[in-house]
Image (spheres, rainbow, N blue to C red):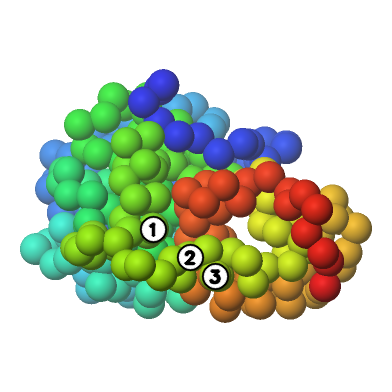
Amino acid sequence: MNSHQLVQAIPGAPQRAIRVFIAEDHQITLWGLRQLVEASGTRMEVIGTASSHGELMNHDATSSADVILLDLDLGGEDMGASLGSLRERCPGHVLVLTGTDSVATHRAVMLKGARGVIHKSEPAESILRAVEKVSQGEIWLNRMLVGQLMGMLTDGEHRPAPRPADPESERIDSLTQRERDIVAAMVRACGSKQLAVAADLGISEHTLRNHLTTIYSKLCVHGRLELHVYAMAHGLDAPAQGKRAA
């Protein structure tokens, strides 16, 4: 368990069982995952399974799943390309189950909307723990992957020598003190809903969304996950000091 980066928990555990949909094309693995989830007692329940892209996208149960445990190579198809349409259909979170160690692949599925990535070689209890955390809106990533994601987001996977100019500093300097405070608050409350973050900041959720739209534009990031990784990589996880507010 200490090999993973877990974002702080959302207060209040769910009262009902976590509804899990399993998408896996190897029948033995599918059977094993079903047995694993059902053996968790009242914590979780399997509400459906699929072994192909077509079955997954047309299964009625996906619309009520809390977590879709998704084999990235489903029936020979790369499911990373379908994450966008899957997320539109399923209001729950996607936890990618994969056998690849490719950091680029893991990064790609996270930026396309997966809430976590777990390797098929992980212990059974780790898989259950990942499902539980992802169902609560948290992020599940290997610690090494977090560090590599930060590096890739900051420097680019194939970027040559550093440029004389520092566009990142210019982007960060364009933030007002209030925007810096909001970024820090979002990092501290990564697993919380925006409504709770807004309440902590003493503003409405609508005002927070407006601020985030501006912040995303200034920093050239897309969504809370990229903002969190970017902020951690550039030391924006603490409120600004002495910077003039807008």
Query: What is the spatial separation of the Cα atoms under label 1 and label 3, in whole angstroms?
Result: 14 Å
Q: Give the vertical position of 61 relative to 29 (above or below).
A: below
Helix, strand or loop at label 1? It is: helix
Query: What is the spatial separation of the Cα atoms under label 3 and label 2, in whole angstroms?
Result: 5 Å
Residue at 40% x, 22% y is 1
Q: Nearer the viewer, mark 1 or mark 3?
A: 3
Q: Give the vertical position of 53 relative to 210 (above or below).
A: above
Residue at 30% x, 61% y is 162
The image quadrant that residue 75 belongs to is bottom left
* Numbered label tally: 3
Q: Which residue is mark 2?
A: 168
Pinpoint residue 79: horizontal percent, then vertical percent: 23, 65
**Circle 1: residue type:** Thr
> Residue 166 or 4: which is nearer the viewer?
166
Circles 3 and 2: CB distance less than 8 Å?
yes
Q: Give the vertical position of 44 relative to 236 (above or below).
A: above
Q: Which residue is mark 1?
A: 154
Considering every residue shown, the one lying at the far front of the view is 164
Q: Nearer the viewer, mark 2 or mark 1?
A: 2
Q: Dot 1: few (<14), some (14–19), or many (≥20) neighbours within 10 Å? A: some
Q: Which residue is mark 3?
A: 170
Q: Where, quadrant-wise, is the C terminus in this rendering?
A: bottom right
Query: What is the spatial separation of the Cα atoms under label 2 and label 1, in whole angstroms?
Result: 8 Å
**Circle 3: residue type:** Glu
Q: Give the vertical position of 38 relative to 239 (above or below).
A: above
**Circle 2: residue type:** Glu
Helix, strand or loop at label 3? It is: helix
Pinpoint residue 230: horizontal percent, then vertical percent: 49, 56
Q: Is residue 203 left or right of residue 162?
A: right
Pinpoint residue 180: horizontal percent, then vertical percent: 70, 59
